[in-house]
Amino acid sequence: MASNLLGNEIEDILRSAVEDADGHLFVVDPSSETVEALVELGTAFEGELPSVKLLAEERLLKDVMNDFLVASSAADLVEAGDLEIRSLEAPVDNSLLVTADRTVAVVTAGDRVAGLTTDDEAFVDTAFETYSQRFDAAEPFKLRTPSISRVRETIGENIDEQTREDFDSVLSSLETARGDGDGLDEVTITLLVAAKNDVLLYDISKWGEDVGIASKATFSRTKTRLEELGLIDTEKVPIDVGRPRLRLKLGDERLQDTDAEELASVAQSMIAS
């Protein structure tokens, strides 16, 4: 007889499902919090992950993956073959965790979460077959964010190691990095870190476009906005042929005097003021 799963956080339910899964684990119609928790668990999990097949509404996936921290970590799991993401055309009655051995309905009540579990053989077989077929028939969800591993590796190779270290420090200080125009999205973060290390705009924007973060035009527009807000400044650097290039500089003493770990919070307060 399967035991129901109880916990204060969805992570407790997911961890139990991941640890007990043998083969495929279908995560069906999850909440945004469940998707975020699944990606975080998969990234930090010690041991061999099951083949996780995420089937969620496209609108929810787009919203969750608008956070660079979540999307870039999910891309790591996809590249490793540990995660597949597909779009659910129509919602189901419950959020489900489905394996070949049991089916778990995820239920939240206030600040508690439960996994109502059955291992009835006939029901579990039917559920597994049903969602296997629905997953196979669903459209793949295309992540447009590069994996965080590739971002970290290439920024060190193409810019320098200090910029990579500062980039990591800024990301680790953030809870989200959403591209909604109001907070610190990945382009803003990259430009601030580049300015902290006196990197040329041409170099950082070319790297950003090549790795898949954003186009050079997006980097240029964001640079202009940050200049207008007084967060960064530029100086012209002559080159042998063509127009001078621009070296990025932090434009405010509050930023110039801060460590990378506090760069994001100081910049965010300046943007909000």
Image (cartoon, rainbow, N blue to C red):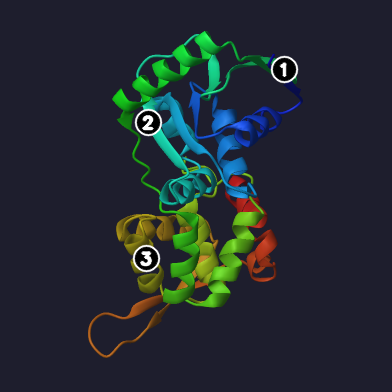
Q: Position of 128 compared to 103: left or right?
A: left
Marks 1/2: CA distance?
Answer: 29 Å
SS for callout 3: helix
Give the residue drawn at x 47%, y 51%: 76
Amino acid type for the residue under numbered disc 2: Arg
Q: Which residue is mark 3?
A: 205
Figure label count: 3
Residue 113 visible, this angle: yes
Residue 227 visible, this angle: no
Give the residue drawn at x 63%, y 32%: 20
Tell me the mark number nearer the camera, choosing from 3 and 1.
1
Amino acid type for the residue under numbered disc 1: Ser
Q: Nearer the viewer, residue 41 or 156?
A: 41
Q: Which mark is residue 3?
A: 1
Question: Mark 3 packing: few (<14 Cα in 10 Å), some, or many (20+)?
Answer: many
Q: Is residue 37 above or below residue 159?
A: above
Q: Is residue 192 above or below residue 90?
A: below
Which numbered disc flags the more N-terminal residue, 1 or 2? 1
Answer whether labels 3 and 1 touch (C-beta < 8 Å).
no
